[in-house]
Amino acid sequence: MLVLNHKSGADPPMAAILVRRRVFFMTKIELFRFRPFGWLISSVGAFPVTRGRPDRKAIRQSLDILNNGQVLMIFPEGHRSDSGDLQQARRGAAFLAQKSGCQVLPIGISGQYGFRKTIRYAMGEPFRIPPDMPREAAQTLIMERIAAQIPASER
């Protein structure tokens, strides 16, 4: 599982380029309402998630992806950060990592997208989250590992 901070809508495709395998990722269901765009993002590995409540279908699909040895990209914060500051992780990434036992690869995104701007992706070391670790501690661990990949001035 890839875990990343979320700065821009360009994060999923840009980060997926770093991995030499097919990457799947959850995307808010609202983006699937315009059918041509929904088809496009589905074709590159996106699947819908209903935010604000546990989405059992998205959870099952995520676990199937991980249990089949495929790559799931997840943004633990649950949404883009308007300020660019790191936020607390929501429960999903920790739950999936603990339930599947998969390796977690933290990626920190820093810099800015745009003309004459530089964006950086830094990969950390893979780790696993023990199944008996308290969920809040697991959420904190994920964000600490992502933060370690980002320059202190941008956290």
Image (tube, rainbow, N blue to C red):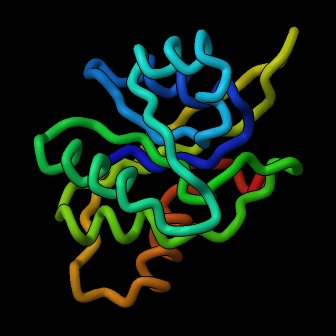
How many marks overall? Answer: 0
Decide which of 41, 106 is in the foreground and name it: 41
**Residue 83's spot in the image, x, y percent?**
88, 50
Residue 92 to residue 48: above or below: below
Rendered location of residue 124, percent (x, y): 41, 48
On screen, residue 68 versus residue 94, left or right, reads left
Q: Residue at x 66, y 44 (%)?
A: 6
Query: From the viewer's perspective, is residue 115 above or below residue 66?
Result: above
Q: Quadrant of the C terminus?
A: bottom right
x 24%, y 54%: residue: 63
What residue lies at 68% left-to-right and 51% top-to-bottom?
79
Image coordinates of residue 38 in percent, x first then y, are 56, 21
Query: Is residue 95 depicted above or below 38 in this figure?
Result: below
Give the left or right position of residue 78, taking residue 54 as reference.
right
Residue 44: image quadrant is: top left
Relative side of 21 to 28, left or right? left
- Give the quadrant of residue 52: bottom right
Given residues 118 and 5, the one toward you in this image is 5
What residue lies at 35% left-to-right and 24% top-to-bottom? 19
